[in-house]
Amino acid sequence: MTQEGRPRLGRHAKIGGEGDPEVFVADEQQEIDLDLARWQTLALRVLADEGVRGAAELSIMFVTEAEMAELNESYMGKAGSTDVLAFPLDAPDVTQIVMPAGSSRGPDRAPADPGDVPLLLGDVVVCPAAAAHQAPTHAGTFDDEIALLIVHGILHVLGLDHAEAAEATEMRRREQAHLEAHHWHGPMPAGFRLEHQ
């Protein structure tokens, strides 16, 4: 932990070109009202604590159960809806991005600068209806469940996993640290559980 109680930058730090990280949030469902600015702020703070610097982009989409079921089947091979899916793009750093063909220098063009290309981190897709169903037996409240799903999805995009016991322990530790720093602004409330399904 840092002096402010925030997680240390880990092996998942990613650095883009000139600029600041951006989080694009889209609400593709109409069942549950969401404060998109609040979730965007949470995501930006998690990215900062995880070491994401410079021009980097992350997308968060809130979708219906039907849309989530389609994504879950198409990409995970599983039937039915789920709560969160993460689609990392895995560009380790901006200097390894290959410039497109035809981006060579022309009469009025400066040489292509990889620093001008944002680092595309990936997408986090959250199903608010699934979050509402499982919140009472998982995180406790709907707000806590959405916050957990966003943090969980971002950590997956940045390369963390929970397939092995040690990985699950590390992911839970980082989730709790981010939630305490940026969602609860204090210790984890009673009744909240950090379990991975």
Image (cartoon, grey):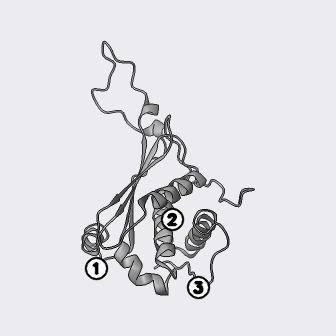
On the image, the x and y values in percent for residue 124 come to 40, 61
Question: Image check: 65 left or right of 16?
Answer: left
* Residue at screen point 46% across, 56% down: 40
In the rendered structure, which disc, 1 or 3, sits on the residue that comes first in sequence?
1
In the rendered structure, which disc, 3 or 2, sits on the residue that comes first in sequence?
2
Question: Image check: 40 left or right of 27?
Answer: right
Q: Residue furthest top?
A: 107
- What residue is disc 3 on? 191
- What residue is disc 1 on? 80
Q: Secondary structure at mark 1?
A: loop
Local crowd size for mark 2, using a 10 Å CA cut-off: few (<14), some (14–19), many (≥20): many
* Residue at screen point 45% across, 64% down: 153
Question: Image check: 10 left or right of 37?
Answer: right
Nearer-the-camera pick, 43 or 96: 43
- What residue is disc 2 on? 151
Is residue 163 visible to us here? no
Q: Residue furthest right?
A: 3
Discs 1/2, front: 2
* Residue at screen point 56% across, 50% down: 13
Discs 1/3, front: 3
Q: Amino acid at mark 3?
A: Gly
